[in-house]
Image (cartoon, rainbow, N blue to C red):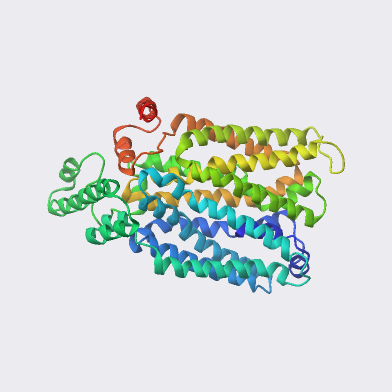
Amino acid sequence: MDTGIIGPVTVMPDYISRFGAHSAIVHGAIISSILVPAAISSFFAGHVADLLGRRKCIAVGALIFGIGTALEAGAVRLAMFVVGRCIEGLGEGFYLGTLVVYICEITPPSRRGPLTAGPQLLLTFGLLTGYFTCYGTVNMGSSFSWRTPFIILASLSLSFSVASFLWLIPSPRWLTLKGRQTQAASSWDRLQVDEKDREETEIDGQVENDAQSCQKDMKSASENEQEKALPHDGRLRNHKTENEFFDVFSHNVRGRTFLAVFIMGMQQFSGIDGVLYYAPIIFQQAGISSSEASFLASGVSAIVIMAATIPATIFADKWGRRASMVWGGLSMGVAMLLIGALYAANTVHADTGAARWVVIVTVYIYVILYCVTWSISCKIFVAEVQPQHTRASATNLAHGSNWVANFAVALTTPVLLQRSSFGAYILWAGCLLLTAVVCLVFMPETKGRSLEDIEAAFRKETMGSRAWRKMHVRYTFSQARN
């Protein structure tokens, strides 16, 4: 919801009269001030989630987020507003990546895609709510025109924090990893997951617990002897270091970690949040002159986004992760190139010509393509390719790269739009096409596979190798036969 609020709020008349008009750089800095704290907290969120559990990490993050939003709602000076955004970012970094991990861990393979994509659907609903809340309050004629959206967001955030702490079921995979088998079985029962879908997880957790016991028995041996005794996949590790942050860079998982970090960073360099944050400015630049009309156009884009996300969520396991990344990157890249080419050719005029409508329609097409491809596939893939002991840390690290890239996009977009009508679109097109090529070469297909099957495949093959691609082809044909 914050993404739908912050862009419209910062161009509202009462907000400008209270805090002043700012240059493009300062405007971008205010909007993006949420992102660096989010990146910092997300780097540590995985370790916190491994120590305290997924449920508590989500609840604490939502609480911090709500406190920051309340400060924004009550801001009397610009510094207080920015501090509120920084605190809000700290909370968002803690809970957002952990929420994806939690959903990935509690769902069976047959339903993981749609359920893990569920938060993205709710994000689009929040975006829609934010835009139309601002559209409804812009003419209130007081500071409540921009305070009201933040008051609503703070209330929702604090309610979500309380609900998460009271009613979320602890992740059975996390409980298994901690050796709490009885509680894990109880959690699976409460989640109503079939025995066949939980069996491999429980066996896998028992192997890790046995491995830890074996490690304790061997600690009197020399370090070299221990290294020879341990299997190559590194599963026999000391309990103290099992969930250490730097395990995500160990030999058997670092390829997955680097790919996840790259994918989540490039998800933002696609320009999606540049379009969403600055939608009013983008539509004004294309010829929709009044601020109220640009707000309405932004709200319509939110409707389009939500409408596109619904089928994308339902069919997340039908389209596949790899195909969505490749075809999504290519199609969105073409859309961005078209917009950039129209501006570069100086054919877009605010008052006349069909080019401005081509730009507006292409922006809508772009966000639809994003919603049905990258918005879903990126977050599912980065969570499900990690082994249990690094899933929280690696997923949150990938989300950290997403926040850093988001900060760069939010900070530079108003400057690029001000100095060049086409530069931002050409830059985003290049990032989209590059990512499509990288995913075509290195990204395996993981849809419909259990987390344990994915882990076993990664242990046997090197990511991006010919063997991985052969495995992908074999899996595709086997699915077709079934």
- Residue 261 x %, y %: 47, 44
- Residue 23 x %, y %: 75, 57
- Residue 69 x %, y %: 58, 68
| Residue 265 visible within the image | no
Of the pair 68 and 258, the residue shown nearer to us: 68
Q: Residue at x 40, y 69 (%)?
A: 166
Quadrant location of the N terminus in the rendered image = bottom right
Q: In the picture, residue 428 is in which quadrant? A: top right
Of the pair 417 and 460, the residue shown nearer to us: 460
Q: For this view, does 352 lie left or right of residue 5?
A: right
Q: Residue at x 81, y 45 (%)?
A: 287
Q: For this view, does 372 lie left or right of residue 8?
A: left
Of the pair 467 and 184, the residue shown nearer to us: 184
| Residue 124 visible within the image | yes
Quadrant location of the C terminus in the rendered image = top left
- Residue 75 x %, y %: 65, 72
Q: Is residue 241 above or below residue 287?
A: below
